[in-house]
Image (cartoon, rainbow, N blue to C red):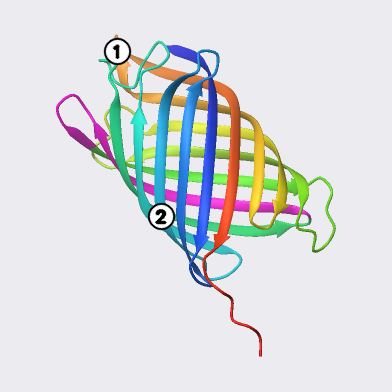
């Protein structure tokens, strides 16, 4: 069974550096059905960052998700608002291939999914690869336009997987602009292919969500760098 939907996904992503290697993370996401303007999901994610060097980035934290019914097949068969609580751990690696900036991200999530009278525990692992290339850029330039493409796959694991281990795959193509080293804005097209963790009439349910994605990234330095001697 297949359900095709149009979506709009908007994200504010902030980082507050509290030391040379440590920082605090906060992002807020809202996802809409764009033609009706109805909100169907929002997410708040917090975390603590650790960056030992320019290539590696680690984070651990907590996220809250509110799911609202949309489309022909809501997440739960009752069509109710549901909450999800997560803890997560992330490791990211970045490297250059000529002018191409390539980033790999692996994330594990411990999820508490609200059901009618209780919460169900589940595990999920995510892998994302992202490639970004500047359109025009000179060495040392802080502001420039760029293009980006990414793919992320999510797979459930553990003994509490209800029906299927495959969860979803996200593909995005975006154009963006670095206003400075601490601020960038990007927008483009995203497609999400998702298999729900339930069946209807003994048939699997697949969602095909396509639409606009817009992201704003802001970084704040909350500490003073030591002056060189």
Q: Tell me which residue sits at (52%, 66%) in the image.
A: 222
Q: Position of residue 114 (x, y in %)?
A: 24, 31
Quadrant location, the C terminus? bottom right
Task: Please give the residue where the numbered disc 2 appears in the rendered image.
Answer: 47
Spatial distance from mark 1 to mark 2, Cα to Cα? 39 Å
- Label 1: how many residues lie within 10 Å, few (<14), some (14-19) or many (20+)? few
Q: Tell me which residue sits at (59%, 48%) in the image.
A: 217
- Residue 74 on the magenta span: no
Q: Is residue 148 above or below residue 179?
A: above
Q: Between 152 and 204, which is closer to the camera in this rendering?
A: 152
| Numbered circles on residues, count | 2
Q: Position of residue 182 (x, y in %)?
A: 64, 56
Left-right relation of 157 to 35:
left
Q: Which residues are magenta?
A: 99-120
Q: Is residue 159 above or below residue 200?
A: below
Labels 1 and 2: the sequence-earlier one? 2
Q: Position of residue 140 (x, y in %)?
A: 79, 63
Q: Between 178 and 220, which is closer to the camera in this rendering?
A: 220
Task: Please give the residue where the numbered disc 1 appears in the rendered image.
Answer: 202
Left-right relation of 100 to 204:
right
Query: Mostly what secondary structure, the magenta segment?
Result: strand
Instruction: Tell me the SS state at disc 2.
Output: strand
Q: Tell me which residue sits at (57%, 70%) in the image.
A: 53
Q: Tell me which residue sits at (43%, 13%) in the image.
A: 71
Q: Is residue 139 above or below residue 13?
A: below
């Amino acid at each position: 069974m297949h359900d095709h939907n149009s979506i709009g996904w908007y994200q504010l992503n902030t980082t507050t550096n509290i030391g040379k290697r440590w920082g605090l993370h906060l992002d807020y996401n809202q996802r809409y059905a764009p033609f009706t303007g109805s909100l169907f999901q929002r997410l708040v994610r917090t975390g603590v960052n650790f960056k030992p060097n320019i290539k590696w980035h680690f984070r651990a934290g907590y996220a809250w998700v509110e799911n609202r019914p949309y489309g022909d097949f809501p997440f739960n068969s009752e069509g109710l608002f549901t909450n999800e609580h997560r803890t997560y751990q992330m490791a990211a690696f970045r490297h250059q291939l000529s002018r191409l900036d390539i980033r790999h991200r692996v994330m594990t999530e411990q999820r508490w999914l609200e059901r009618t009278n209780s919460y169900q525990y589940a595990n999920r692992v995510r892998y994302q690869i992202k490639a970004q290339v500047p359109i025009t850029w000179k060495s040392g330039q802080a502001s420039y336009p760029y293009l980006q493409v990414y793919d992320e796959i999510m797979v459930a694991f553990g003994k509490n997987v209800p029906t299927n281990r495959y969860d979803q795959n996200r593909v995005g193509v975006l154009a963006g602009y670095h206003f400075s080293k601490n601020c960038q804005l990007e927008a483009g097209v995203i497609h999400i292919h998702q298999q729900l963790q339930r069946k209807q009439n003994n048939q699997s349910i697949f969602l095909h969500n396509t639409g606009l994605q817009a992201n704003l990234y802001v970084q704040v330095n909350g500490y003073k760098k030591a002056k060189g001697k």
